[in-house]
Amino acid sequence: MQNFIKSYNTIGILNLKSNESGYTSTFGINKFSDLSSKEFQQRLSNIAPSQKSRSTMKKASPFLKRHKRQVDELPDSVDLRYEKVNGRYIVGNIVKDQGSCACCWGFAVTAVAEAVYAANVGPFTYLSEQELCDCATPGSLGCTGGDLVWGTEYIMGRGLAASSTYKWDEHRANQSGMCVSEENKRVLVEDKFDYYFADRYNAEEEIMAMLVQWKSPVAASFAVGNRFRSYSDGVLVEQDCDLKGPSFHAGAIIGYGSERDYFGRIQKYWIVRNSWGPYDWGNEDGYFKVIRGRDWCGIESIGAVGGRIADHTHA
């Protein structure tokens, strides 16, 4: 009860500050409201995202060229939830729930791979976060946190099975030696994807928007504070996160747009797919909106990755 009362009071303060600032973001009670800070932290990654420069990512071939014409021609808004290729949707309608396992990094990378596979190969197939959580961790347990680079490099080198054949178990990756990947069960074949990595020196909002417009979602890591923990709806603008850690999370950017806040200011935003399920957190069916172009809590600069089928390039 003490944790709940603390959350309730914090939420009241957050809503008051947001309202006074004219922002659309609201905050509310959810499934985390009765957890202590330590209990909530256990559901987040305690591993700081990689800060590798794109030039050091030898396995990631460069497939993007920044052209002013392409940036200028970007549409004002994109939402891949409603995009179809050859009559099929490319983003799954079920927002998955990682439960108590801090494998957000695996869910974010898998969401990218699912959409790119559906857009270029198809049909849409839910892929296995569990395989990444079990097999893509270099000497650590997948449920204690991870890095987008781990999942990306694993897929590029090994491929990935469908979730129907390698099923999710939120407690499984709390143990080591649980990897049971089988080559003949892989839906997504290795060496078929290229990726773009951002870092603190190469944060480029336009490149990320171009990827989304090209039907390539962007997985991104970010630091977490009380505002994200208690998010309800609207656009998150204010930051209360610590980029030094230890609380990190990851999601898949599947769209962007803009809206006016209550003071009439235009707020550009990203639409991000979370992995805390469609219910009991937020009122956006498992998605959230965050301010675009300001590197909110590092979302545009700490470990962003977008994927494309390797054989498809854009000049």
Image (spheres, rainbow, N blue to C red):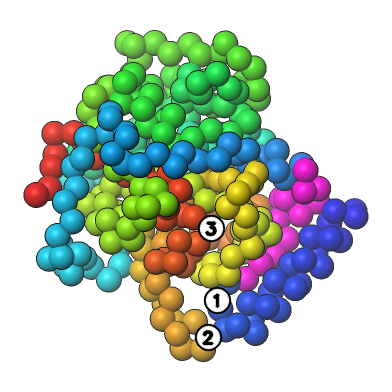
Residue that numbered label 2 is attached to? 262
Residue that numbered label 3 is attached to? 297
Instruction: Give percent across and percent down for residue 138.
Output: 50, 21
* Closer-to-camera residue (4/225): 225
- The circle drawn on residue 186 is none
The residue at the point 60 percent across, 83 percent down is: 21
Question: Mark 1 belongs to which amino acid?
Answer: Thr
Distance Cα–Cα, label 1 vs label 3: 18 Å
- The circle drawn on residue 24 is 1
Residue 193 is drawn in which quadrant? top left
Question: Mark 2 belongs to which amino acid?
Answer: Tyr
Secondary structure found at label 1: loop
Question: Mark 3 belongs to which amino acid?
Answer: Cys
Instruction: Please tell me which of labels 1 and 3 falls first in the chain.
Output: 1
Q: Does the magenta stretch include residue 236?
A: no
Instruction: Please tell me which of labels 2 and 1 falls first in the chain.
Output: 1
Secondary structure found at label 2: loop
